Amino acid sequence: MSGASSSRAWLPSLRQAGLVLLGSAALLWSGWTTRAVTDLQNRRIVTVKLGAMIEEFVAAEARAQRNPQEAQARLALYLKGMEAVVDRLGKDGTTILVAEAVISGSAPDYSPKVKADLDLWMTAHGAH
């Protein structure tokens, strides 16, 4: 046997190389899907009564008899704070459903938690 033909004996055929690549891709895909499913199983689904919270805030602002510009600025700050609090919950792995749009009551209500966090946010931003 010559040196060239003996070195070719160790080279894989195209079919063998394709099978190895296909097997590797299947293993990578399997690992990725397992992680994705596990991440989905760890997410919490909660409801928040966003509409009711906004209505309460607007009613309280009306009772406070603020001038229109100040009331508008406070409402804008409140909505910005609500967005920040809800975004933070979403980044923690929580899926938030607007309670007014949910028929079933199977998801826990996080409205008190969101309201408490929002009150803290408003205080930190000088609104209380």
Image: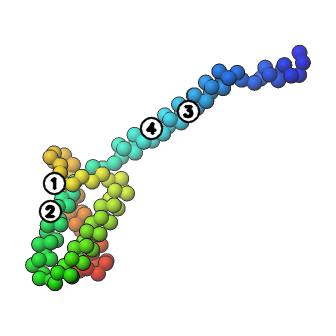
Quadrant in the picture for the C terminus: bottom left
Instruction: Give the number of the mark in front: 4 or 1.
Output: 1
- In the picture, measured across the screen, residue 42 lies left or right of residue 34, that is left
Furthest-front residue in this view: 69
Type of residue at label 1?
Glu
Q: How many marks?
A: 4
Mark 2 or mark 1: whose residue is earlier in sequence? 2
Q: Which mark is residue 52?
A: 2
Query: Which residue lies under the disc numbered 1?
Result: 100
CA gap between label 1 and label 3 equals 44 Å
Above/below status of 55 relative to 22: below
Whole-percent x and y of residue 90? 34, 56
In this figure, which colouring scheme has been used for the structure? rainbow
Name the residue at 21% across, 57% down.
48
Whole-percent x and y of residue 89? 32, 59
Mark 4 or mark 2: whose residue is earlier in sequence? 4
In the foreground, 92 or 81: 81
Type of residue at label 2?
Ala
CA gap between label 3 and label 2 equals 50 Å
Query: Which residue lies under the disc numbered 3?
Result: 25
Mark 4 or mark 3: whose residue is earlier in sequence? 3
Query: Which residue lies under the disc numbered 4?
Result: 34
Asked which secondary structure carries label 3, the reply is helix
Dot 2 alpha-carbon crowd within 10 angstroms: few under 14, some 14 to 19, many 20 or more: few
